[in-house]
Image: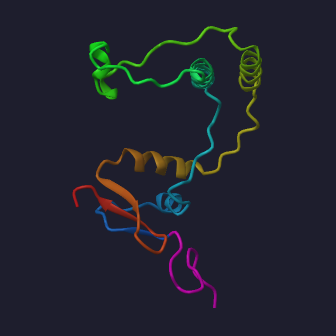
Amino acid sequence: MHDAPGQRKSGAFCNAVVNVSSHPLTPAQTKLLRKNLSFCPTPHAINYIELSEDVYRFCRRLRLAEFFCDREDTETDNDADPPHATLPDFLRKPSPFTPDIGRDIALDTYIKAITIDIMTLRQKDFSPNFTSDEKTALKDLKTNTNIIIKPADKGGAFVVMNTAD
């Protein structure tokens, strides 16, 4: 006797999709959901603008860590603090401050090396890890505001429910 696809020998479903919504799932949508909720599609190409921004933010964090590493956190009297210092964090504007280049030669060399290495990366041949039908299914599931997809409490199944429920 052979086990059905998606079943364990014990009879419990593995990566089963339980649809309790009013939206009927296509075979491609079901196949996509069985890949797991942590499935990540292979990107078509490297977004060099986004990559450049990420590298800049990373390098800025390194420079800030080096700049403030020797500072001690000292408690000051609240009367001496400017009014914006007592604002909650979510109301404060983030500081645009970036320490100058040249403060730490080793850090500057490291930042230059990783920036060159990362920005000169070339993407290997693109091989998609899902079919065009699954790509369409992913787009349809993402844009469908009438359903929600969640992992089941037990058994490794996924449940498709109406958002109104």
Is-magenta flag for residue 61?
no
Corner quadrant of residue 124: top right
Magenta span main SS: loop
Is residue 19 placed above or below 1 in the rendered structure?
A: above
Q: Quadrant of the C terminus?
A: bottom left
Is-magenta flag for residue 3?
yes
The spot of residue 3 in percent (x, y) is 60, 83
Residue plotted at (52% across, 63% down): 34
Q: Is residue 55 left or right of residue 104?
A: left
Corner quadrant of residue 99: top right
Is residue 19 placed above or below 142 in the rendered structure?
A: below
Residue plotted at (41% across, 68% down): 152
Q: For the magenta stretch, what is the residue range? A: 1-15
Q: Nearer the viewer, residue 21 or 82?
A: 82
Q: Quadrant of the N terminus?
A: bottom right
The spot of residue 39 in percent (x, y) is 56, 53
Q: Is residue 120 left or right of residue 92?
A: right
Query: What colour scheme does the image use?
Result: rainbow
Q: Nearer the viewer, residue 71 or 7?
A: 71
Residue most extreme to the bottom? 1
Is residue 79 placed above or below 154 in the rendered structure?
A: above
Residue most extreme to the left? 164
